[in-house]
Image (tube, rainbow, N blue to C red):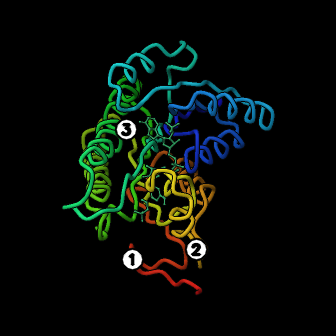
Amino acid sequence: MAKTVLITGATSGIGKACALRFSSEGWRVIINGRRKDRLEELYSLIRKKFNVEVHILPFDVCDKNAVFDSVGNLPEEWKAIDLLVNNAGLALGLDPVDQADTGDWDTMIETNLKGLLYVTKAVVADMVKRKKGHIINLGSIAAKETYPKGSVYCATKKGVEAITQGMRIDLLEYNIKVSLINPGATETEFSLVRFKGDNEKAENVYKGYQPLTGEDVANAVFFAASLPPHANINDLLLMPTAQASANFFHKKT
Ligand code: NDP
Ligand code: 8X3
């Protein structure tokens, strides 16, 4: 029987690459995001390329009722989820605390922390019953090091790290694995979202060196999901070779 993965934030970047990677390996995939048109495109692409089962589950992870309704009302054949990839997330703005937009803070905290918690609670209930499952959370180098002008985004990822550790302890008795994958700079729509559509600023983030791709991160997520039942990746930091830490890059000028 093919395994089933639910991936949040599969309309772009790392989440989309995960959906393609898992489906290429024969997994059944449940794809989430707010942009339904993109989910429909991805649905068609996966069906055409890999001919595996796909289920579209559009919801905003911040909308508690939508999360619990969507997951609670999954069709019977999609209810048993083997793996949850908590990937939906974002940074908004790159500003010192005295100048940052409080609305940006709210959205990052709502999405990266509360959204991840709602989806986990909705999905884990069935894993607990079945005493089986795996949750992979997307952290970041930002969970390991706070960088200038990024305090709240970094705090949310530090929070994801703490939540991951807590979940691992709480879910231990139910045989549920909990992993954290922390990428460094990865070229996706992340910076375009952070800089609110400013293409030039977004492109500058990845100039002069080779960043990770969504596929690089999806490979790490798939590796974590592929270990035998007795082994778990607790915490993995995956960086571009040209990035030594949050702030040290070897860039060609
Ligand atoms: P993208 O912007 O390319 O993708 C983000 C995804 O999250 C989109 O599919 C978006 O879908 C989804 N998303 C955002 N908000 C919500 C929401 N409220 N409800 C549901 N889905 C949502 O960025 P990445 O692929 O780079 O980011 C994926 C994860 O990886 C994030 O958690 C990010 O913090 C983390 N990360 C990224 C790094 C990078 O350098 N790119 C490095 C380290 C970690 P939609 O808009 O359709 O809802
Ligand atoms: C995204 C990468 O370096 O902007 O988590 O925090 S970074």
Q: Quadrant of the N terminus?
A: top right
Foreground label between 3 and 1:
1
Name the residue: 67% across, 43% down: 20
Report, in whole angstroms, how far the alpha carbon at label 3 lies from the one at label 1: 38 Å
Q: Which one is earlier in the sequence, the residue at label 3 or at label 1?
A: 3
- Identify the residue position indicated by label 3 in the image: 175
The amino acid pointed to by label 3 is Asn
Distance CA(mark 3)–CA(mark 2): 43 Å
The residue located at (38%, 46%) in the rendering is 178
User: Which residue is under mark 1?
Assistant: 247
Q: Secondary structure at mark 3?
A: loop
Q: Secondary structure beneath disc 1?
A: loop
Q: Report the residue marked by disc 2.
A: 207
Q: Quadrant of ligand 2?
A: bottom left
Q: Residue furthest right?
A: 48
Q: Which residue is rendered at x = 29% and y = 51% of the image?
A: 156
